[in-house]
Image: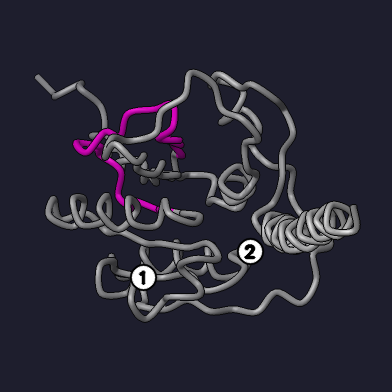
Amino acid sequence: MKNSTGPKLKPQKKMAKILFIQPTQYAENGKLCKQKKINLPGLAFPLLASYTLLHWKVDLAIEVVDEINFDSDADIIAIGTMGHATFRGLEIAREFKNRNKTVVMGGYMASIAYQEDSKYVDSVVVGDAEISYPKMLKDFELTGKVQPIHKDIVTELKNLPLPRYDLLTQKELLQCCLFRPDAAVLICVHFALLHVCMREIIFFVRWMRLSAILKK
């Protein structure tokens, strides 16, 4: 009797996965800062998610409201930090490296201190990631590794894909004001200048009041 089981099916290849992590920072009491809702969510990871190869699965953890799953089955852990959250980001990177995960970092803080950050991760994406990020994924697929530094200059921002807002809308949002990280840099500069100007204004007002008192 002939075997009628039919042709053998090829085993399906495991779907590759990337986990984006936006770390929180430590409060003065030494505990991680946590919120019930996200205020002013950034567009960096939703935009990068739209650049991710279609056969890759994308997860996003925003630590201020999410818990980091250090047992994640993701192939790549991608960490982006701002300000003091960089220290927490490096802490997360070390933990995932101890678990033999491929870890990459990006963002303006990592771009500024890429030589230091590269000591803790497999790769640092310096500057904008619209070109570097897809190349990094393709390199990983071909070799199972990532280059230590990815630095491709973006000269124009035409025809940007629509960010994957669904990664944010499934979380608790306080406001829906979204911004790109490069816009955040301009905002930080604006508020820094505003802070300096306000100090000068306050000093001037106090000096005027003191002058008025002395005249009396």
Q: Tell me how the rendering is colored.
A: one colour
**Tag shown at residue 22:** none
**Residue that badge 2 annotates:** 130
In front of the other: 48 or 52? 48
Answer left or right for 97 relative to 159.
left
What amino acid is labelled 1 in the image?
Ser
**Residue that badge 1 annotates:** 123
Query: Alpha-carbon neighbours of circle 1 within 10 Å: few (<14), some, or many (≥20)?
Result: many
Residue 185 picture quarter: bottom right
Asked which secondary structure carries label 2, the reply is loop
Residue 166 picture quarter: top right
Percent across and percent down for residue 153 are 65, 79
Answer left or right for 7 relative to 47.
left
- Which residue appears farthest toward the front when viewing the image? 216
Query: Alpha-carbon neighbours of circle 2 within 10 Å: few (<14), some, or many (≥20)?
Result: some
Magenta highlight on residue 102: no
Does the image show residue 159? Answer: no
In front of the other: 173 or 15? 173
Above or below, comparing residue 148 to residue 80 in the picture: below
What amino acid is labelled 2 in the image?
Glu
Magenta highlight on residue 74: yes
Percent across and percent down for residue 118 are 32, 74
Tell me which residue sits at (47%, 24%) in the image.
35
Tell me which residue sits at (55%, 66%) in the image.
108
Q: Quadrant of the N terminus?
A: top left
Q: In this picture, which residue range is highlighted in magenta?
A: 58-79
